[in-house]
Image (tube, rainbow, N blue to C red):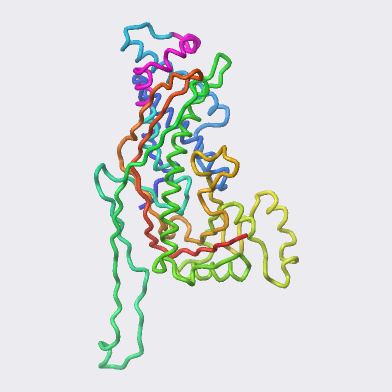
Amino acid sequence: MESLKLNNAPASLFVGSAVDERKDLVAGGRLILSEAHGRKAAEIRGEKFETRLNDAEYRETNEKLTQRTMLFCAKVAANANGEEAPATYSEFLKGGRKWAADANFLRCLQGITSDVISPMLPYTTSNALGALAFVDKVGIGQTYEVNVLSNDIFLFQDSAWGSSRSVPKNYLYSKSITINPQPRSAAAKIKWYQLVGNEQGGADIGRYYLALAGGSNNKVLALWNGAMTAGIANSAFVPTYLKKSGYNTANWIALAKAVSQANGLPRESIVAYGDWAALAKVLPSGTSVDAALTYGLGSEWFSKGYMGTCMGVPLAPLQNAYVAGQVNLASPTEMLSASTIYMLPRAGEGFAPVYIIFEDDPIVLEMSPDKTGDMTIDVNMTISVEAKGVFGSKIGVMSSVS
């Protein structure tokens, strides 16, 4: 079974309607979120993302979608309040203070937002973590089960005719791992004018959707990191021979060779993931001819910040993130280690070390006016998700890369 990814998200998620305005707004929101998230991940890791809009189309669609969404919510609220709805976006902006505090307007907006983000979260999460996570969904209240098969092979012993049944027995085993999604919540504030723009433009609902989805991905990244850290500490998952401390050429060769042989794959099928700071250190090191080997590599290294391939093993950067709420601190904490490189089979040729499972139900989103001078809106969002280390394929870990 293939992990959920933006490129294989079902087309039905993006199908609008000429007769159902709300359905059309939801489909447009999913498209904008998909484009924004996919382009960002493709730019960071150099992966291919099949865009549906060019840059100019994205900006135009985003602005128009914002205006249409706000006017639709204002129309719903006005009908509920027995009022006349604004006919143009200019009229809507003039009544901004009223709409920002209108409970019916906010309920309509939160409903559309929930329908936009809920089915997209598993796809944006998988897009952020690549082959390091397998992402799937499970029905409401159900348990997700992973059946891990043996990676061993039969051992043949020397024997003699008539005594072949006396050799030690080999066992092929399987292990079932269960995963139960748990609720995770976040509280946030939205600046009204940053969302709706002004008479000169600037309406940006795409940034709003991306911030909510990004916050969820930030939490999922923390869950993934916890599952990954616990798994690496378990010698049954990551034996000593698959761990190296410090980068040098000899350690790189030894680890790549070990991961390749442990999974029965050629080294070209192994990918090295890590923070950009760690990948930048992957250059000839520890040999008597480092300078000669490094000659000619400067152009690619300086252009990308890391080498695309090292001794047949492709390198892929992980997008690190600061812990939520710390981005404006003097020294924010990074969520992922900036000095660790993970080697594992590329997607489709092995099993991801961590499984991330979402409960297939709408996110719970609540919006309420803050009633402050800058017209902020309080947002509370709850998702149901869990991450668990499975480690069905062997991975290698190189720590203290500095």
Q: In screen coordinates, is 243 left or right of 301?
A: left
250, above or below 318, in the image: below
Task: Tell me residue 65's x, y (percent).
Answer: 46, 23
Task: Tell me residue 271's x, y (percent).
Answer: 52, 59
**Quadrant in which residue 274 is drawn:** bottom right
Magenta-tinted stretch: 87-112
The residue drawn where x is 46% and y is 28% is: 189
Task: Tell me residue 343's x, y (percent).
Answer: 51, 61
Given residues 275 and 257, the one toward you in this image is 275
The residue drawn where x is 40% and y is 32% is: 14
Task: Tell me residue 153's x, y (percent).
Answer: 36, 74
* Count of marks overlaid on the render: 0
Quarter of the image with the C terminus in it? bottom right
Look at the magenta stretch and give its main secondary structure.
Answer: helix
Within the magenta stretch, is there residue 62? no
228, above or below 27, in the image: below
Given residues 21 and 75, the one toward you in this image is 75
112, above or below 322, in the image: above
**Quadrant in which residue 254 is drawn:** bottom right
Q: In screen coordinates, is 46 left or right of 151?
A: right
Given residues 300 and 317, the one toward you in this image is 317
**Quadrant in which residue 184 is drawn:** top left
Q: In screen coordinates, is 206 left or right of 298?
A: left
The residue drawn where x is 29% and y is 46% is: 138
Within the magenta stretch, is there residue 110? yes
